Image: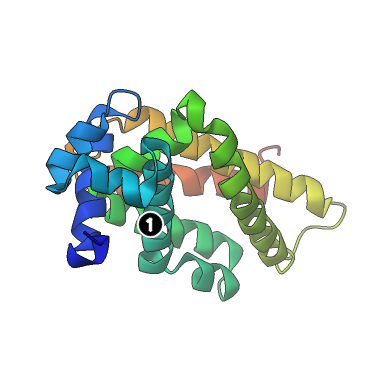
Amino acid sequence: MPLQRYDKEKVLEACMSVFAQHGYKNTSTIMLAEAADISKALIFHHFKSKKNLYLSLMEHCITKIRFKLGVDAIIEHGNFFEVIEKITLLKFDYYRKYPTEYKFVFEAFYAVPEELKKEIEERYGIGSAERYQLLEQLFEKVPLKDGVDRNHAFELLMIAIEHFDKKFISEVTDIEAIDEEYGPNFLKEMNLYHRMIRLGIAK
């Protein structure tokens, strides 16, 4: 039976929930079929394997996140530091509304199943590089003090941004458990680091 006769969105969301709860390794096609209320044979017919289904879900999830957050438009039309702040706040709000997607994305990018490492790097490494280039282009508009090397300054800021990405991942193992104050406090600390970089720390 064609997958179109089912609500494809519901099938994908149901499968994502199973992967988010049990992880890629511990999820079976039987569990996926039961959650989506379709046959195991139908899953294999349309996705060929659990691996392909997982990768399809990643594409579905990332496309949805990019659309909902409007990241590309923000990057193209914003101030560098305002863009970082807006994206951070939007990510907090989005993942609090959709905790299943947070859990799924967390595994896909920060606890990558060994079997999927190559495919994920090939598919999404390019996307990360493109976003890096967009931010770099945006940083070109930031006025710098005399004698400051622009490339070094940008690299330093990206190191700080990566630090806070890792900090968030290490602190927020359960997105549903964080309170409303976490986001503003996290942002305040991140902006403090950015301010120190912008103004310098020596007398």
Work out which quarter of the rendered image holds the N terminus and state it: bottom left
Q: Residues within 10 Å of mark 1 (few under 14, many from 20)?
A: some
Please tell me which residue lies in front, 30 or 166.
Answer: 30
* Residue 168 seen: no
Mark 1: which secondary structure?
helix
Residue 64 drawn at (x, y percent)? 36, 62
- Residue 197 on image: x %, y %: 64, 45
**Residue 83 is at least partly visible in this image:** yes
Q: Is residue 34 left or right of residue 161?
A: left
Task: Give the residue number, with chain letter if any, for mark 1.
Answer: 60
Q: Is residue 170 above or below residue 71?
A: above
- Identify which residue, 95 or 81, lies in the foreground: 95
Q: Identify which residue is drawn at 80% across, 54% down.
A: 150
**Left or right side of 105 for 21:** left
The answer to which of 38 and 71 lies nearer the viewer is 38
Q: What amino acid is labelled 1 in the image?
A: His
Q: Looking at the image, which residue sits at the far bottom?
A: 77
Residue positioned 29% across, 56% down in the render: 94
Q: How many marks?
A: 1
Who's the residue at 50% across and 24% down the image? 114
- Quarter occupied by residue 80: bottom right
Question: Quick one: 128 or 55, which is closer to the camera?
Answer: 55
Residue at 84%, 50% (x, y): give it: 149
Rendering coords of residue 81 (x, y %): 56, 60
Residue farthest along the right direction in this orientation: 147
| Quadrant containing the C terminus in the rendered view | top right
User: As displayed, is residue 91 above or below residue 118?
Assistant: below
Specify whether 89 is left or right of 73. left
Residue 140, image x and y in percent?
A: 74, 65
Q: Is residue 98 above or below residue 6?
A: above
